Amino acid sequence: MGIKCVIEGCGNRKEKPEEGKQILFHQLPADENKRKKWLENIVKSSCGLKKI
């Protein structure tokens, strides 16, 4: 079984990246405070995502 992005509408999968494209997947921290900071920063990012 492969790994896939959890962002709604994203089709990136670890087993089949596009040719010449590197995809990095990250796991959210288990620590509640660190996870909260990650999620706050993801929402603030300039990537234009509206739903995680």
Image (spheres, grey):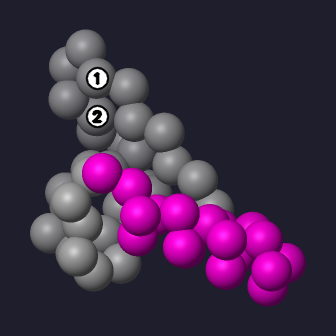
Q: Nearer the viewer, residue 15 or 51?
A: 51
Task: Locate the C terminus and report the quarter of the image it occupies.
Answer: bottom left
Of tags 1 and 2, which is closer to the observer?
1
Vertical side of 26 occupied by 7: above or below: below
Task: Tell me the magenta residue range.
Answer: 28-46
Residue 2, disc: none
Looking at the image, the residue that sits furthest to the left is: 9
**Residue behind mark 2:** 17
Task: Locate the N terminus and report the quarter of the image it occupies.
Answer: bottom left
Horizontal arrangement in the rendering, residue 39 relative to residue 37 (left or right)? left
Helix, strand or loop at disc 2?
A: loop
**Residue behind mark 1:** 21
Where residue 49 sits, quadrant-wise, is bottom left
- Residue 40, image x and y in percent? 54, 73
Residue 4 in sight from this viewpoint: no
Vertical side of 51 occupied by 34: above or below: above
Which residue is at 38% across, 26% downward?
Answer: 22
Helix, strand or loop at disc 1?
A: loop
Vertical side of 20 occupied by 48: above or below: below
Horizontal arrangement in the rendering, residue 20 relative to residue 24 (left or right)? left
Residue type at mark 1: give it: Lys
- Residue 41, image x and y in percent? 53, 63
Residue type at mark 2: give it: Pro
Q: Nearer the viewer, residue 20 or 8?
A: 8
Which residue is at 39% across, 36% downward?
Answer: 23
Residue 32 in sight from this viewpoint: yes
Q: Are marks 1 and 2 in contact (CB under 8 Å)?
A: yes
Q: Main secondary structure of the magenta part?
A: helix
